[in-house]
Image (cartoon, rainbow, N blue to C red):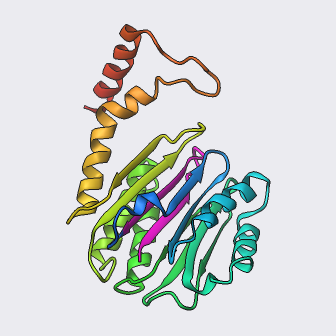
Amino acid sequence: MTWSIVARDPKTGAFGVAVATKFFAVGSICPYGRSDVGAISTQALVNPYYGINGLKMLAAGVPAPDALRLLVEADVGNASRQFHIVDAAGRNAAHTGRDCVEWSGHVLGEGVSVAGNMLAGPQVIHETLKAYQANMDQPLDERLLRGLEAGDAAGGDKRGRQSACLVIHAGEEYSQLDIRVDDHTLPLPELRRLRDVARTHYLPFKSALAKKGDPVGIYERAKLMDVIAKAQAALS
């Protein structure tokens, strides 16, 4: 199942993962990320510990290609796995097991990786990467969405559509954005709608939360409402 895009923003250092598939609740099992560490998507016959242990390795300073190699070597089921990984230096790597259902494969770019299986064809991952790279002037969440939308237009998952997710880690121990469409006939339009809703209120509110450099954040209601109003005005 699944195709996904994993990326590190070269300007901000933020990490993002976006995934789409004909499978229920893909956002609950495929994407993993941690600010200042890296991002991973594990798919095909998913092994969640690729994400869990992969982030531990990256946090310990293991480069992405070495982390991928170590995880694959330790898993006797690796022929049925697919996963890709990017680290804090923008190094990336991908694995597509020989037993992944066709069409399956991956493609790497600078600080970005696209991988998929059970796809309509190789054009899905290539169009995803092309759209991402063609929109480097856009925020990371928008680039990832446009990538998935281009891959979907190129055929996407050959079985159809059901779920999608978008996760951004941007400097804090908690995610900046984590939205999921678990079961929908048109998951990507719904994911974009949710992202747009998040931009109007949720993200302005989240910008006022406690941060590493500000362990209190904005807690006075009047100031909080002012922050949200200014952010909303900037979007209009």
Return the x and y of residue 84 as percentages of the image width and height: 58, 70
Q: Residue furthest left?
A: 185
The verdict on residue 18 being magenta is yes
Horizontally, residue 163 falls left or right of residue 171, namely: left
Which portion, as a residue range, is magenta? 1-20
> Which quadrant of the structure image shows residue 58?
bottom right
Does the stretch in magenta take in 182?
no
In this view of the protein, can residue 90 be seen by the observer?
no
Looking at this view, is 104 or 89 the one in front? Answer: 104
Residue 53 appears in view: yes
Q: Nearer the viewer, residue 181 or 138?
A: 181
Please state which of residues 44 and 222 is positioned toward the viewer in this rendering. Answer: 44
Q: Is residue 22 above or below residue 212?
A: below
Question: x, y (%) of residue 212?
Answer: 64, 28
Residue 118 in percent (x, y) is at 40, 84
Q: Quadrant of the C terminus?
A: top left
- Residue at the image point whose x is 29% and y is 82% from the top: 159
